Amino acid sequence: MRVTDRLSTTLAARGFDYPRQYVWLVPLVLCGTVLGVLIQRNAFSPPGIVALAGSAVVAECVLSILVGWNSHLAFVTINVVAAYIFMRHPVDMDLTPVLLITMTIAVAATASARASLLATAAAVATLALSHFANHQVRNLYIAGVLFAWLAGYMMLTQLRLLQQERVTQASRSAEAAGDERRRIAREVHDVVAHSLSITLLHLTGARRALQEDRDIDDAIDALADAERIGRQAMNDIRRTVGLLDTGPSTIAPEPNIGDITDLVADFQRAGLPVAYACAGNTELVTAATGLGLYRIAQESLANVAKHSPGSRTDVAVTISPVAVELSIGNHPCATSESAGGSGLDGMRRRAQLLGGTLTAGPDGSGWLVHSVLPLRLGESDCPLGLVGPQ
């Protein structure tokens, strides 16, 4: 450890991590003041009680710089006694009160309120017991000591507030990082579930075409679609996981309500009987709400392909001036989330973050997912982290 760091390190270990310039300012001012006091009193030769008092202050400063020694009791005692000795030999324009003022502000900024008040009282008592030709000057010095305590206490208060802000900021950063990881996990889950569901449907179609119909052309078409969906999924996963990288990444548009048509078409090409209807003005739907609708529809259709691939599915979007409704129902077979799945929880979480609701369950003849999301006109983005570059 460098010598210049020891005093700062000692104070920082006690919770007073002031800038090094502030820490060094106190011993430098004390040493300079003592030098001026000794010059005023011609106390260098021969050495007397005044020179010894000055030497004690300088020695204390040197020890604090060289070894990081910092004792408030010794610091206050040495400076108060030295100041009293100096003022027992009065001179015009005495610099001794600067010693007490510097001591007071240093203790107030690095000690408890009780300790700093005791040090301030000692400094005031020393000034009160000293002999000044002009009492107004003495009162001015006492006011300076009191102001020094106030300045030091304000420094300590600001330091504590800054430290609390650092803790709060670190907590917020950790929370934001956790929210972003969960968001990316949901995106990866949605992409993987969607792509694997469609790919499996295409592979099933290809197998049946070869096994039952001996139709090579249909099998090739199904395998080609499966390959296309797989490549698209890999690109989406790379783009989503790329958010975790610290380097620059390309910005791609998020899916929105208009992309639900292509989503349904992918499932239709995979052999899933899906019907889609959209009523209302899609321009009323914001980007955040559109992404939420797309992901809910994507997860719901992936569940249908996983649990009830042969059932008929109806997807309906109804847009009113105040809300948008999404319904995905499949009949006659009911579908459900497998044990340990997170798809339904993820859909509910998306709806809640957008201020809406989502219900999922049997509707008598099949399985129905129904979500209602409010329309927030004028929003260009979502402050909840649902929309972002991928």
Image (tube, helix red, strand yellow):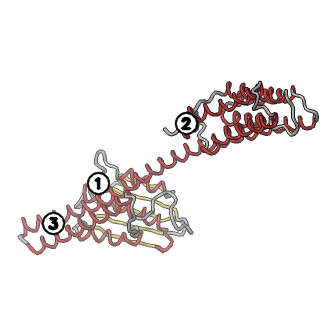
Asked if residue 156 shows in the view, the reply is: no
**Measuring 78% from the left and 37% from the top, which residue is drawn there?**
39
Front in this rendered view, residue 192 or 341: 192
Which residue corresponds to mark 1?
Answer: 334
Instruction: Say which label, 2 or 3, has the lower sequence index.
Output: 2
**Of the numbered discs in the image, which one, if any, rests on residue 6?**
2
Asked if residue 106 shows in the view, the reply is: yes
Q: Position of residue 266 (x, y in %)?
A: 27, 69
Which residue corresponds to mark 3?
Answer: 205
Residue at the front extreme of this rendering: 46
Which element is circle 3 on?
helix
Quadrant (top left/top right/bottom left/bottom right) for the C terminus = bottom left
Compared across the picture, whether 200 is left or right of 8 comes to left
Q: CA–CA distance between discs 1 and 3?
A: 22 Å
Front in this rendered view, residue 112 or 268: 112
Q: Amino acid at mark 3?
A: Gly
Q: Position of residue 121 (x, y in %)?
A: 79, 28
